[in-house]
Amino acid sequence: MMLSAEDIDRYVEQYQAVEPLYPVESEAIETLPTALQTGEYGWKDTEWIVQWCFRRYLGDYPDTDRRRIEDAFATESFESVHTAISTAADTDDLHTAADALTALSGVDIYVASALLFFISPEQYLVIGPREWEVLSESGFLDRTYPASLTIDAYQEYLTACTQLATETDRSFWECYMGLWQCWKSEVDH
C-alpha cells in the first residue's frame, strides 16, 4: 500500500464526509491547542479528549476498558490535570511531556498521545492500532502494533508520522484523517 499526497487528500475528503465526530474534532483542533497551551480550559475539555480517545471507534472499543480508564481519569483533581497539561505544553521533550501526563490516573501512553495531539497537533499525533497498521502496511513502520505501548514505540510512531507528513506535505491532522479513513477503506474488510 502506498500513501501519496493525493491518497491522503482523498481519504481526508471521505473522512470529512462520513465520520460523525468530524465536526466536533475539527472544532477541537481549532480551539483546544490554544486553550491547553494557555491554561484557558475547563475540566470538560480534558475529559472530552480522554473520552474521544475511545469513542472515536464508535463502539468498536471494549466498553469496560473505556469506562475503567475514563473513571480513573475522573478521580484526578483539576489542579493535577492542569499541572500535567501545563508541563506537557511547556516542553518540547516527549519524555517530559509523556511522564507528566502518564502520572495522571487512567492515562497511559495511548491516552497521553491524544492529550498531546490536542495540546500541539503540529508536533504530536494520537496513536492507535488502526493508524499504526496503515503506516506499517505502507512501509513507514517495520512492525505490528505493540502489545504493550511504550514511549519508545510512540516515538517510533511519531517518526513515521513525521516522514509521512513531510513526504506528502500534509499536516498531522490531515495525516490522522487520512490514516483513519485509509484503514476503514482499505484494511477493515
Image (cartoon, grey):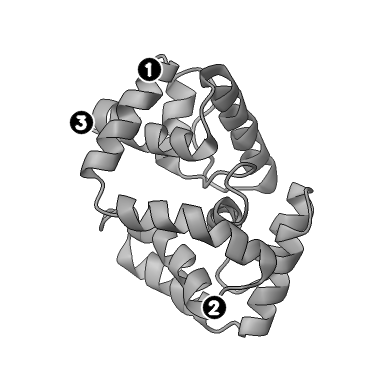
Q: Residue 90, percent across and down?
A: 77, 59
Q: Residue 61, percent across and down?
A: 33, 56
Label 3 – label 1 distance at C-alpha? 22 Å
Neighbour tally class for label 3: few under 14, some 14-19, many 20 plus, Cα within 10 Å: few
Neighbour tally class for label 2: few under 14, some 14-19, many 20 plus, Cα within 10 Å: few
Q: Residue 109, percent across and down?
A: 60, 54
Label 1 – label 2 distance at C-alpha? 38 Å
Q: Residue shown at 54%/40% (left/top)?
A: 146
Residue occupied by mark 3:
189
114 to the left or right of 93 = left
Which mark, residue 6? 1
Lower sequence index among marks 3 and 2? 2
Label 3 – label 2 distance at C-alpha? 40 Å
Lower sequence index among marks 1 and 2? 1
104 to the left or right of 140 = right
Observer-nearest residue: 154 or 47? 47
Query: What's the amino acid at mark 3?
Result: His
What SS does tag 1 mark? helix
What SS does tag 2 mark? loop
134 to the left or right of 124 = left
Q: Of circles 3 and 2, which is in front? A: 2
Which mark, residue 42? 2
Q: Can residue 172 be seen in this view?
A: yes
Q: Residue shown at 43%/31% (left/top)?
A: 133
Looking at the image, do the residues carrying marks 3 and 2 touch, with CB atoms under 8 Å apart? no
58 to the left or right of 147 = left
